[in-house]
Image: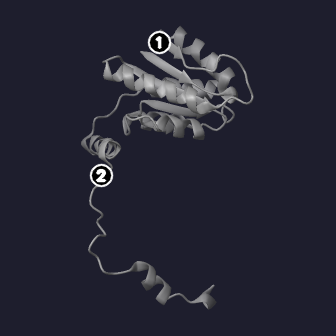
Amino acid sequence: MRIHIGTDHAGLEFSTQIQHHLAEQGHEVVDHGPIEYDALDDYPSFCIRAAQAVVRDQAAGVEALGVVFGGSGNGEQIAANKVLGVRAALVWNISTAELAREHNDANVISIGARQHTFGEAASFIDRFIATPFSGEERHARRIGQLAAYEQDGVLLPDPRAGHTRNTMSDASDSFDPEAG
């Protein structure tokens, strides 16, 4: 499988180690940067390029996934999710790595390099790669809703539409500030 990697300075050491780990397992690893440590570098371009490559490969029928790193993984996940067709999940344990694929068909994961040991991160990535999407109807339906929103901004109808009861005013009418 082709694995696209993107990071920033906070994840650079992890990225290098992970690339060796994945190559030893027979994966084709594509590094989207950075190429050297710079404490002032910015993660968005590295992570977005990795995410774009995953989408391009998948559209071309190439089996591909992505892994992005940073100090916490939060910004990197946000950056990757800006790419149309990416479903990036922040992973912090084996269960979230597995569920990202199984339920969300995530094609990119984000890991906080300052939050985990190399061994932990490697195990998350290995589980992510090894876990297939379940294909269950409920999960496929939800992913379809996300894809539709990306395309045209349309959401399912609001189930509260047409209801006249204002729950906020009902709650405030019965509010007793003395009750504690």
The circle drawn on residue 27 is: 1
- Is residue 127 in view? no
The circle drawn on residue 151 is: none
> Which residue is at a point 65% across and 31% down the rendered structure image?
42
Label 2 to label 1, Cα distance in Å? 38 Å
76 relative to 62 in the view: left or right: right
Q: Quadrant of residue 21?
A: top right
**Crowding at label 2, few (<14), some or many (≥20) Cα neighbours within 10 Å?**
few
Residue highlighted by disc 2: 154
Q: Amino acid at mark 1?
A: His
Q: Quadrant of the N terminus?
A: top left
Give x and y (percent) for residue 132.
36, 28
Give x and y (percent) for residue 17.
64, 17
**Crowding at label 1, few (<14), some or many (≥20) Cα neighbours within 10 Å?**
some
Can you say whether 148 is above or below 60 in the image? Answer: below
Q: Quadrant of the C terminus?
A: bottom right
Give x and y (percent) for residue 36.
70, 17
Give x and y (percent) for residue 176.
56, 90
Can you say whether 143 is above or below 174 in the image? Answer: above
75 relative to 82 in the view: left or right: right
